[in-house]
Image (spheres, grey):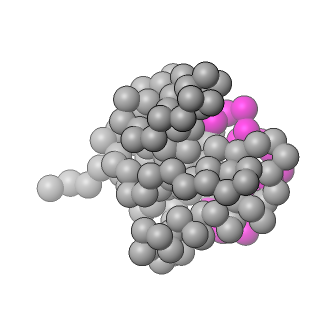
Amino acid sequence: MIVAGLGFRRSAAAEEIVTLVELALNRAELARGALAKLGTIEALADLPAFTEAARRLAVPTMAVGEQDLSAAGPRVRTQSARSLAARGVGSVAEAAALAAAGPGATLVLERIASTSVTCALARPETEP
């Protein structure tokens, strides 16, 4: 199971989100079927572009609360000054992916970006 964490501008289109998620899966050498859900911050989770992207990718969405985003913050690898100023984490996409994948999740792919969207991939903690 793979979770795509997303950060995006309110003006982003569903097509740009879908394209970047598919590019992320490709870069991580994962099949599209490995994708289990999309996660983003609560402030963006109800936007039509996000919900439409999830529909096109045939996966559920998850709204990540501020507390869970902050808790995942120390595990992000990317440090964006803009993201730190706006949300208190180095990468909204990475923190959202880690939080949505659950405690002990690990990044599979660090944040990649398009014009209006960032995407990172995480995998839940697996049993030994």
* Image position of 29 (left or right of 127): right
Q: Residue at x 78, y 60 (%)?
A: 14
> Which is nearer the eye, 21 or 58?
21
* Image position of 22 (left or right of 36): right
In the rendered image, the residue lying farthest to the left is 128
Q: Is residue 22 visible?
A: yes
Find residue 16 and report its horizontal and vertical position in percent: 74, 62
Instruction: Specify whether residue 54 is painted magenta.
Output: yes
Q: Is residue 50 visible?
A: no
- In this rendering, the answer to whether 50 lies above or below 78 is below
Instruction: Specify whether residue 35 is painted magenta.
Output: no
Q: Residue at x 68, y 68 (%)?
A: 19
Which residues are drawn in magenta?
41-59
Q: How many marks?
A: 0
In the rendered image, the residue lying farthest to the front is 81
- In this rendering, the answer to whether 59 lies above or below 83 is below
> Which is nearer the eye, 37 or 70?
70
Find residue 54 and report its horizontal and vertical position in percent: 69, 60
Q: Residue at x 36, y 36 (%)?
A: 75
Q: Quadrant of the N terminus?
A: bottom left
Q: Residue at x 30, y 41 (%)?
A: 104
* Image position of 74 (left or right of 66): left
Residue 92 sits in quarter: top right
> Which is nearer the eye, 94 or 44?
94
Residue 85 sits in quarter: top right
Find residue 71 and report its horizontal and vertical position in percent: 42, 26
Q: Quadrant of the C terminus?
A: bottom left
Find residue 97 and report its horizontal and vertical position in percent: 49, 46
